[in-house]
Image: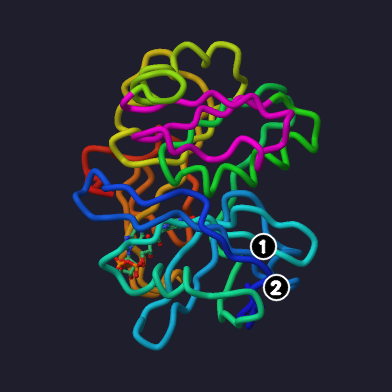
Amino acid sequence: MKQVTASVTESRRILPGILHRSGRKISGVYLIRLRCPEIAGEARPGQFVMVNCGEECVLPRPFSIHQADGEVIALFFNVWQDAKGTPWLARRKAGDEVSLFGPLGNNYTLNPEARRLLLAAGGIGIASLRFLADSAVKRGLAVTLLCGTPTKHQYPQELLSPEIELVPVSEDGSVGKKGLITDFLPEFTNRADQVFACGPVAMYRAMAGMPELKGKPVQVSLEMKMGCGLGACYACTVKTKHGLKQVCRDGPVFELDDIIWDEVDLSI
Ligand SMILES: Cc1cc2nc3c(=O)[nH]c(=O)nc-3n(C[C@H](O)[C@H](O)[C@H](O)COP(=O)(O)OP(=O)(O)OC[C@H]3O[C@@H](n4cnc5c(N)ncnc54)[C@H](O)[C@@H]3O)c2cc1C
């Protein structure tokens, strides 16, 4: 884990604002690239960084490593209109400096015998799964990515490697299949050796009850509210079948079956 000052190499808005299901407004979804060779060189899919988001934010903010390429990492993030951290980060321009530390947490684990992966990204969950998709494609694995959003504003296909089979799903049917990702997961599970998911807790609860996933290796990334990212504050503690775990240190990636989902806050 390194504490570094990174320079911004690129920052742009990728998707427009929407009203989140929580009632809070997202003013846009941004992609920022940060030159930080110390972190980029160590980063593995599933890990995250803690970013110091300006003087008004006492606590650093956690973000998944969306890509790590050479000396640069990318973050892909929702900008909460009523908040301080993400609007600050979205205002950074190329050449600005950002202080952050990482990489933190564990990572997604590929079974050596896996050949076909199914990735399920609910909303901003693509932020974490993109890095996994890229590294799986580099290893010659087949990747199907179910990408769910409330409306037509989907992660741009042109940003993804053409080898990834993208299956868009939208709640209002404006793009791809109409419904929730969990409505379509069962169709794709039998041809996958391993399943990976990143999305809201409601999605994981639905997955935990799916007969099609019983006995399959399924890894999920949890995004709990987090204070320090280092295992010191216990804000991100979650109940698992193996006792209390901290999402920042023991996770964020867990086996779907290990989490006691009834005990996890549904608002996340
Ligand atoms: C491991 C991990 C990886 C994450 N990766 C991403 C990502 O790649 N892209 C992305 O858009 N968001 C991600 N999040 C959520 C992101 O950290 C929050 O949206 C962000 O901290 C909000 O900061 P804010 O100041 O704009 O909002 P505020 O709501 O003002 O945040 C206030 C406090 O709540 C915490 N917080 C608020 N919402 C969340 C949340 N959903 N999860 C965790 N902490 C929260 C913040 O860290 C901060 O301490 C991740 C969260 C975790 C735990």
Residue under the image location 35 percent in, 25 percent down? 180
The one of 156 and 114 positioned closer to us in this rendering: 156
Residue designated by label 2: 36
Start-end of magenta stretch: 143-172
Residue 94: percent from left, percent from top: 64, 74
Answer above or below: position of 171 versus 268: above
Q: At numbered mark 2, what does the secondary structure look like: helix, strand or loop?
A: loop
Disc 1 target residue: 73
Q: Is residue 193 left or right of residue 37?
A: left
Amino acid type of the residue tagged 2 in the rendering: Cys
| Quadrant of ligand 1 in image | bottom left
Specify few, some or many for label 1: CA neighbours under 10 Å numbering under 14, 14-19, or 20 or more: many
Q: Is mark 1 within 8 Å of ligand 1?
A: no
Q: Is residue 91 above or below residue 122?
A: below
> Any atom of ligand 1 within 8 Å of the CB at mark 2?
no
Give the spatial CA distance, label 1 vs label 2: 7 Å
Q: Looking at the image, which residue sits at the far bottom? A: 55
Q: Secondary structure at mark 1?
A: strand
The residue located at (44%, 78%) in the rendering is: 53
Q: Is residue 110 left or right of residue 87?
A: right
Label 1–label 2 contact, CB within 8 A = yes
Asked where in the image residue 206 lies, by quadrant, the reply is: top left
Residue nearer the viewer, 91 or 205: 91
For the residue pair 63 and 256, the one nearer the viewer reads as 63
Query: Mark number for residue 93?
Result: none
In the drawing, does residue 123 fall left or right of residue 110?
left
